Amino acid sequence: MSLTLYGKPVAETIKEDLIQRVAALKEKNIKPKLAILRAGEELDDTAYENRILKLCQDVGIDFQVKVMIRTVPQELFEEQLIRLNNDPEIHGILVFRPLPKQLDEEKLSNLIDPAKDIDSMNPEHLKKIFIGDASRIAPCTPEAVIAILKHYNYNLTGKNVVIVNRSLVLGKPLSMLFMEENATVTVCHSKTKDLASITKNADIVVTGIGNAKFFGKEYFSDKNTVIDVGINFDEDKMCGDVAFDDVEDIVEAITPVPGGVGIVT
Ligand code: NAP
């Protein structure tokens, strides 16, 4: 029977730490405040937003939400973003993505103040991650993967890590974070040959391909710790990229979906 690496205790630890850090700032008369900027009223966005606002309330962070119409022109959206950049009472800005297609994401990413960019939208952060600058803000999902492993006392030094994803939000920054921890990293993708032989031999396998239950028994061995980042739906039920029920008895440890990486992110 393998170990299930639940996300909840990790998230609780992060929350406790936040409560203390927010309290320390308030003692210095700094009231941390988050601004959410979004275009439109997509159902997914409001559910995500409600979870964020609840978390802000729980830890004592103020917030404001600016909703623009889905068809907002680029100039108006930029104007709002600049206003938030320049507002001294706002410490963090979160722009909801995906953006509607009339908005130029690249331009907006370069416009957001890196010091307030809590979702690591500005390429400045990726550059800093690359050069190992401690002031970087890494994208949330890679940070969550590392937080889970650290919470469960994994020493990553010298570990063979395989990441199946090469996107800018996951695989690329995560490979840098693992290297910071002295792991040996292999990044795989859709053109990788004989993926199973690579994953089987890894100490840690991170999956993030967005394909429900794609990774079955044949991809794993008893030396693997599996971190499943995928969020998919199979017959309306949320599941990861890994066929959890088939694999959990084979691997050494595994994160569930739901209840794993998502809650920490
Ligand atoms: P993405 O940009 O579509 O990237 C998917 C990656 O998987 C690509 O590198 C792709 O390779 C690779 N891939 C696809 N099919 C493959 C296959 N059969 N074999 C090997 N590699 C394959 O997606 P993303 O934005 O990074 O997100 C990935 C997943 O993570 C999604 O399921 C998303 O829902 C989930 N996610 C979860 C969280 C969380 O908090 N848990 C947060 C964010 C995202 P190529 O580069 O060759 O195309």
Image: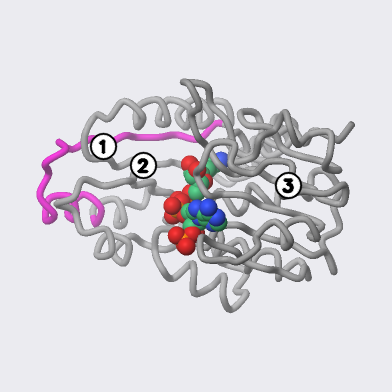
Q: Does the numbered disc 3 mark a residue whose Cβ is under 8 Å from ligand 1?
A: no
Amino acid type, label 3 = Glu
Residue 197 in the image, given as x and y percentages of width and height? 74, 61
Q: Amino acid at mark 1?
A: Lys
Whether residue 175 is visible to the viewer of this picture, yes or no, is: yes
Magenta range is 60-82
C-alpha distance separating marks 2 and 3:
45 Å
CA–CA distance in space, label 1 to label 3:
48 Å
Q: Which residue is mark 1?
A: 66
- Circle 1 SS class: strand
Residue 229 location in percent, x, y?
A: 59, 44
Q: Are marks 1 and 2 in contact (CB under 8 Å)?
A: yes
Q: In this orientation, which residue lies closer to the viewer: 89 or 235?
A: 235
Question: Residue 54, which numbered label?
Answer: none
**What residue is shown at x 18% (from left), y 50% (from top)?**
101
Rendered residue at 42%/41% (across/down): 34
